């Protein structure tokens, strides 16, 4: 029904992430979110150590939000990370982002599939 993927643009000072939900079904889809948080993601270094969690310490509007994805089209959400962990820049190297799309319902029904994806990317040396 929905194909969820991540695209990474890793620059010198920050990475920009695109979270893409493609509607592969034959009908339009309405995604319902219980808050203003549409997605969440974590970033781990090459050893598997967590270095960043997008949703940690953030507050989101507690109101239902909706996103419609027409059949055969896609919806893209974006986020940016400035390569910091605890106020310090992480070293250059290989990292993995794991993201989840967080709808509580799709066309009024609970999602039957997990909408998650992960991809490796390279952070350049400072």
Image (cartoon, rainbow, N blue to C red):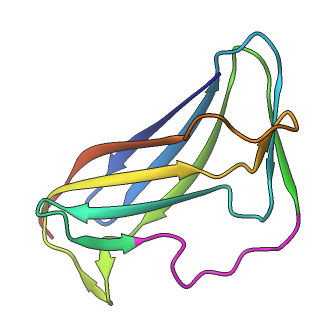
**Could you tell me which residue is drawn at 80 percent across and 74 percent down?**
61
Of residues 98 and 77, which is closer to you in this image? 98
Quarter of image, res 33: bottom right
**Could you tell me which residue is drawn at 38 percent across and 52 percent down?**
98
Using the image, determine if residue 24 lies above or below residue 21. above
Q: Quadrant of the N terminus?
A: top right
Quarter of image, res 72: top right
Give the image location of residue 94, x and y in percent: 14, 54
Give the image location of residue 38, x and y in percent: 67, 55
Horizontal arrangement in the rendering, residue 107 relative to residue 121 (left or right): right
Give the image location of residue 125, x and y in percent: 11, 65
Q: How many marks?
A: 0
Horizontal arrangement in the rendering, residue 126 relative to residue 116 (left or right): left
Q: In which quarter of the image is the C terminus?
A: bottom left
Quarter of image, res 29: top right
**Could you tell me which residue is drawn at 11 percent across and 63 percent down?**
47
Q: What secondary structure do most residues of the magenta stretch adopt?
A: loop
Is 56 included in the stretch rendered in magenta? yes
Give the image location of residue 124, x and y in percent: 16, 58
Using the image, determine if residue 111 lies above or below residue 122. above
Of residues 33 and 113, which is closer to you in this image? 113
Query: Residue at the bottom extreme?
Result: 87
Is 27 included in the stretch rendered in magenta? no
Using the image, determine if residue 107 lies above or below residue 27. below
Horizontal arrangement in the rendering, residue 39 relative to residue 65 (left or right): left
Which stretch did the figure color magenta? 53-63
Of residues 116 and 73, which is closer to you in this image? 116
Horizontal arrangement in the rendering, residue 87 relative to residue 94 (left or right): right
**Could you tell me which residue is drawn at 85 percent across and 47 percent down?**
66
């Amino acid at each position: 029904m929905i194909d969820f993927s991540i695209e990474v643009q890793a620059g010198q000072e920050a990475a920009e992430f695109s979270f893409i939900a493609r509607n592969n079904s034959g009908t339009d889809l309405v995604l319902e979110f219980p808050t203003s948080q549409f997605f969440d993601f974590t970033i781990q270094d090459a050893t598997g150590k967590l270095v960043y969690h997008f949703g940690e310490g953030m507050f989101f509007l507690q109101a239902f939000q909706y996103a419609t994805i027409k059949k055969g089209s896609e919806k893209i959400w974006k986020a940016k990370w400035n390569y910091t962990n605890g106020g310090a820049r992480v070293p250059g190297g290989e990292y993995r982002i794991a993201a989840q799309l967080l709808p509580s319902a799709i066309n009024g029904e609970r999602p039957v599939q997990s909408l998650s994806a992960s991809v490796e990317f390279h952070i350049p040396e400072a």
